[in-house]
Image (spheres, rainbow, N blue to C red):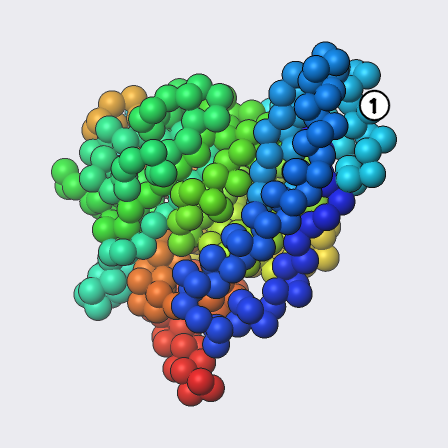
Amino acid sequence: MLADLDEQVDLGRLGPALSPLSGTRLERRERVLAALREVAGRGQERLRPFLESSRQEGLVRSWEGFAIVNRLLVEATPAGIEALARRPEVAALALESELPVPSLASQRAGQGETATPGRTSWALEAMGAPAAWARGLDGSGVVVGVIDSGASSTHEQLAPGFRGGPKSWLDPDGGSAEPRDTRFGHGTGVLSVAVGRNVSGYLLGVAPAARWVACAALPDGRYSNVRVTRCADWMLQTGQPDVLAVAWVLPTGGCDRSLRPLVDAWRAAGILPVFAAGNHGPGERTDRSPANYEGVLSVGGLTPEGDVLPETSRGPSACGAGPFPRLTAPGQDLVAAFPLGRDTYLRARGTSFAAGIAAGAAALLVQSHPEATVPELETALGTGRLDLTAALARLDGIRTAARSRR
């Protein structure tokens, strides 16, 4: 059972403290984390006597606290849950849920239209990555995170870029000490098009010098609100990437705001989340959350011919956002890593991989202007077709204007 407590941080009221004029990006992040931790610690401590006495009575077995939202995961008997619901500190309860995640399209090498994937991704030239590399922008000093099925730290494209150590990987269910991926291989593929090292003659990664961190929230391709909460909290407090690829959508259509507080906390802390639009098109109103939240960066797919990938989910957004998807990036006939072996590849398709490519592009923007805020990065990436050269030029202008106001 997930229990959200009544006292929560009003991130909107932190606005002046999070202004680009109020310190470095890391200093602003620490302010957000300090506020979240203070409120969570205070609220959860008030409930501790009840939890301790309930455990002695056999009503509560265990609990775990989070800071990204003031939330507790409580294992309790039905009577314990009823008692918890009556507590004045508790604002809302949600049952633990695990549901199938809608398919995120990909093709393994040896299947589909051709026998093997190409060795050079057409996406790189189409979006202007070589021109950015010529400027010395390759993702150096930037960390990209992924909440997905997992990630392979042994694949040749990802092994050199893993940040390493206990603060770079979390397996909430399996508890593996080293990064791993499941038979789906989804997280490995998404990461590879973002930060693949472009080795062994394969060119696929937009930000090949960026490092990566990962959390296995969907190890079997199934959405769990508990695993996602754990991974979201870990990304904010421990992993702390600069860019976060969220290449999945909620199992149900429409506007589901259950993840909105998590997304808002990431953005306030200077972590840019990049969301896959989903593969439920081409009909209208096929958008899914969290990609359809107001103000976030949702990414649809493009074909090599420049058309929108047919299965890309379309708006108008059920959450009342602007254009949906906001951005389109290459999402068909891509080459991506697959964790079957250290040098196994697949032909990839879908908005998941388009989101990975956009996350790699965002990493280059972060490298070019490390103090850029999340809204500035989103504005620079723009709307419509992803054009990295234009995005970098826009960010140059945005940051020049910001410096002139100091």
Please name the residue shown 60% across and 34% down the image.
65
Q: Secondary structure at mark 1?
A: helix
How crowded is the residue under tag 1: few (<14 C-alpha within 10 Å), some, or many (20+)? few
Q: Nearer the viewer, residue 148 or 283?
A: 148
Rendered location of residue 300, percent (x, y): 51, 50
Most foreground residue, 81 or 111: 81
Q: Quadrant of the C terminus?
A: bottom left
Q: Is residue 398 left or right of residue 12?
A: left
Q: How many marks?
A: 1
Rendered location of residue 6, percent (x, y): 76, 45
Q: Is residue 290 above or below residue 382?
A: above
Q: Measured from the top left, where is residue 387 in percent x and y? A: 39, 64
**Residue 98 falls in image quadrant:** top right
Is residue 164 in view? yes
Taking the view exactly as shown, the residue that stands out farthest to the left is 200
As drawn, 237 above or below 155? below
Residue 45: name its quadrant: top right
Dot 1 corresponds to which residue?
A: 82
| Picture layout, residue 308 above or below residue 191 | below
Q: Residue at x 41, y 43 (%)?
A: 239
Q: Residue extending furthest top?
A: 58
Q: Judge whether residue 123 can be spotted in this image.
A: no
In the rendered structure, the answer to whether residue 61 lies left or right of residue 237 reads right
The residue drawn where x is 82% and y is 30% is 85
Q: Residue at x 47, y 57 (%)?
A: 30
Judge whether 372 appears above or below 73 on screen. Answer: below
Residue 358 location (% of width, % of height): 41, 53
- Of all residues, the one furthest to the bottom in this rendering is 404
Identified by mark 1, the residue type is: Glu
In which image quadrant can residue 68 be found? top right
Classify the position of the N terminus by image quarter.
top right
